[in-house]
Amino acid sequence: MRVLGVDPGLTRCGVGVVEGVAGRPLAMRGVGVVRTPADAELGHRLVAIEQGIEQWLDEHNPEVVAVERVFSQHNVRTVMGTAQASAVAMLCASRRGIPVALHTPSEVKAAVTGSGRADKAQVGAMVTRLLRLDAPPKPADAADALALAICHIWRAPAQNRLQQAVARNRLQQAAAPHARKPPTAAAQKGRTA
């Protein structure tokens, strides 16, 4: 599985591509940051992020795009910018028919380091170790993007099994009332005719 991880942000949007399957060594295929100038108009910044993500999608052709789920912070301006960059990443993937997975920061930290409260240095160190890199990717946004991709690769099999079980349960529940219904009068009349 090849996953493009996106750590959304207006000034620095981390991107990283990881390939592999759960239980086997993973390989980094690319890492970087899509940057926009802080003094540029918002619309121009979002277009620049779109163009940057589109280039990554063209170059790496991922099967899935894993994006950090935006969560409420104290700084509303920061949350808005993160949410806008996140939406651009989801739009770019969805436009191409590429599935999008959202993972919370604590979910990613727990998957990569074993602790949902790990700091950026710990995440960077584990990404370096897991991908057998010489040094942690810089800036931290790039390491976070790789961590998102790793998290998705490791969690996707379990999530898929869970989704399939839920879908089977819904089908069984939907079919159950039909199986128990007594035949209608018209149906009984048709049998005797």
Image (cartoon, rainbow, N blue to C red):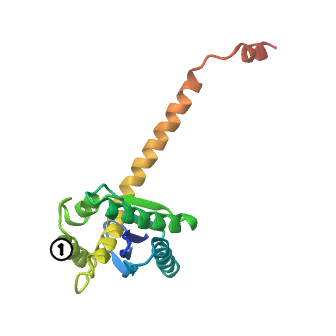
Whether residue 170 sits left or right of residue 17 in the image: it is right
Q: Return the x and y of residue 24 as percentages of the image width and height.
A: 32, 71
Q: How many marks?
A: 1
Q: Residues within 10 Å of mark 1 (few under 14, many from 20)?
A: few
Q: Nearer the viewer, residue 3 or 96?
A: 96
Out of 119 and 193, give the one closest to the viewer. 119
The quadrant in which the N terminus is found is bottom left
Above or below — where is 2 with respect to 74?
A: below
Q: Residue at x 21, y 59 (%)?
A: 116
Q: Is 48 on the left or on the right of 139, as rendered?
A: right
Can you say whether 117 is above or below 179 in the image? below
Q: Which residue is mark 1?
A: 121
Q: Quadrant of residue 140?
A: bottom left
**Residue positioned 23% across, 81% down in the render:** 136
Type of residue at label 1? Answer: Ala
Left or right: where 56 falls relative to 10:
right
| Residue occupying image coordinates x 47% and y 75% | 53
Q: Position of residue 137 (x, y in %)?
A: 27, 81
Q: In which quadrant of the rendered image does the C terminus lie?
A: top right
In the image, what residue occupies the spot 30% across and 70% down? 147
**Residue placed farthest to the bottom in the image?**
134
Question: Could you tell me which secondary element the residue under label 1 belongs to?
Answer: helix
